[in-house]
Image (cartoon, coloured by chain):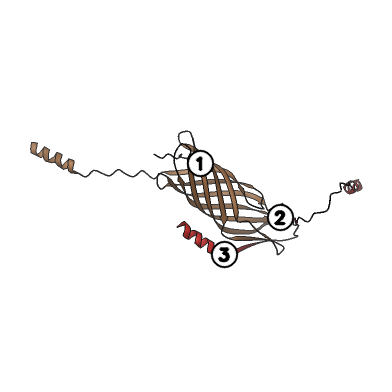
Chain colours: A brown, B red
Amino acid sequence: MTGLLWALSVAWADEPVERAAPPPIEPWAQLGAGLELRPRAEAAEFIALRAGLEAQSSLRLGVEVSWAPPRALDRLGELRGYSAVSVSAGGWWWAGGAWSPGLGCVVELSTRSFYGAEGLVHRALLPALGVEASVAVPLGERAAIVPSARLTTDLRRVELRVDGQPVELMSPWGLQGSLTVLIPRVELP
Amino acid sequence: MILLVWLIFSFVGCELKVIVDYPGETGLDTGSDTEADTGADTGAATAAADDNF
């Protein structure tokens, strides 16, 4: 009997130790609003919603949807402008710490609806790239408030014409400033 | 991966151009309003308004 117990205890002790389970992949979400500046166009506010999964402890992958209301184009008068709905996919890397700095990179597909006094004139699908710098400031136990700045560039050119006459090329560059709430907040060892 | 996406999109961007053609009068602000402002009030608007009564 004693021998059997000894054999069992040895067998138990010889079992390979299970590896520590990887941390669970956590979902996250981010919601907020901002302002977009584009050369030769009126500034426009926008609403953005992001959600995704934490791929590693410091990298969050996700998808973003944003909407910006109509804005006028400077050289075309107040009645001509465009609005935009954008879908982006990207990754955001967070450094951690009390005020965690973050860097993001997104690929964007934007639908711009160009309108005039008579209504919708043209709807265009424009791919774009963006890089973003952020800071995640803790806001309570679970959330963080995130001021961000993003620089985007369109990958298709847009030529604006009036009555067939070329007026100008729309600037491909856009600068966005936003304030969002991130849940859960960034917590790194 | 991102570089590849960028290259594909750059190629598409080089090949394609979106043309947005607004119909109607141009009504464009050409910036050619260079006439000196003499400050003289011609009273034309007031006269036109008076004609309505």
> Is A39 left or right of A178, judged from the image as shown?
right
What mark, if any, has residue A34 been given in the picture? none
Q: Amino acid at mark 2?
A: Arg
A73 or A79, which is in the foreground?
A73
Return the residue at label 2. Answer: A75
SS class, disc 3: helix
Badge 1 and badge 2 in a common chain = yes
What mark, if any, has residue B14 been given in the picture? 3
Q: Residue at x 72, y 53 (%)?
A: A77
**Is the Cβ of the residue at disc 1 closer than 8 Å to that at disc 2?**
no
Structural crowding at the residue carrying mark 2, measured as other residues with C-alpha within 10 Å and reported as few (<14), some (14–19) or many (≥20) = some
Badge 3 and badge 2 in a common chain = no
Q: Amino acid at mark 3?
A: Cys
A127, above or below A177, in the image: below
Disc 1 or 2, which lies upstream in sequence? 2
> Is A109 left or right of B50, judged from the image as shown?
left
Q: Residue at x 56, y 50 (%)?
A: A151
Return the residue at label 1. Answer: A135
> Is A172 left or right of A119, judged from the image as shown?
left
Q: Position of residue B1 (x, y in %)?
A: 45, 58
Q: Position of residue A87 (x, y in %)?
A: 53, 52
Task: Give the number of the mark in front: 1 or 2.
Answer: 1
A35 or A86, which is in the foreground?
A35
